[in-house]
Image (spheres, rainbow, N blue to C red):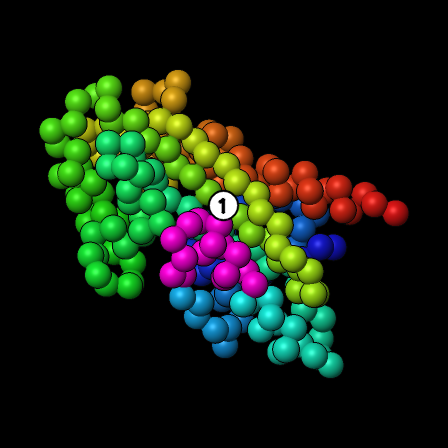
Amino acid sequence: MTTLLIATRNAHKVGEIQAILGAPFGFLTLNDFPAAPKVVEDANTFAGNATKKAGELARWLRNRNAGRAPAPDYVLADDSGLEVDALNGAPGVYSARFAGGERDENSPDAENNAKLLRLLQDVPPERRTARFRCVIALVPVGEHPARIFDGACEGRIQWAASGHGGFGYDPLFVPEGFVQSFAELGEEVKNRLSHRARALAKLKAFLDGTRSEP
């Protein structure tokens, strides 16, 4: 069985990735490696942050597991966020800490959503276009380069939050072709449409291909 270390402690993200990839993969998270180093995500692109996180954790695992039990086969790290056209692509890589200004730590979802609505309060409906974007880096724990998989989901930002599902900006984001927010549509629908689902579909196709090789 191919085992993936998902480089997060975010239960929502882990659940989404597991639901989309499913069997026959084994999954570990950073909760299984409490001594794992904290990686500073200071790149200015989603790909840069995802690659840095996966690469540093893969190196740590190689050193940690030298002469010991086998390490996971791959480290999977992603960086994702919301790009709003009227804000020139912001919050982008700063999506999780949008409301915090200069602070490095993530901000509460409610504060990030409130700031976004405040900045868009005078923006008309036709200019409230946005997209969720996800970039996944897959790094073998052996000495191999990262592979990058990306996905995007187009939509718009509504005037007020709705729904109680999902996380992050889900209550504000309405995907193209729908009138309900991601927070209202439910996990099954979201896992078909989301930026992460689309990136993971590419990743799964790659992994399935490597598994079928002689």
Asked whether residue 176 is drawn in magenta, I would say no
**Residue 4 makes an appearance in the image:** no
Q: Is residue 71 left or right of residue 19?
A: right
Name the amino acid, label 1: Val
- The quarter of the image holding the N terminus is bottom right
Q: For the point 17% across and 33% down, which residue is it? A: 120
- At x 50%, y 65%, the residue is 30
Where is residue 172? Give x, y as percent: 27, 34
Q: Is residue 137 above or below residue 128?
A: below
Q: Is residue 103 above or below residue 14?
A: below
Instruction: Place residue 208 in its image quadrant.
Output: top right
Where is residue 211 drawn, in percent x and y?
78, 47
| Residue at the extreme bottom | 67
User: Looking at this rendering, what residue extends furthest in the right direction?
Assistant: 214
Report the magenta stretch's main SS.
helix
Tell me residue 179's x, y (percent): 32, 20
Residue at 28% across / 42% down in the picture? 90
Disc 1 secondary structure class: strand
Q: Which residue is mark 1?
A: 135
The answer to whether 151 is drawn above or below residue 58 in the figure is above
Q: Which residues are magenta?
A: 41-55
Q: Which quarter of the figure has residue 102?
A: bottom left
* Residue 62 drawn at (x, y percent): 65, 73
Would residue 44 appear left or right of 78 to someone viewing this image? left
Residue 203 lies left or right of residue 211; in this view the side is left
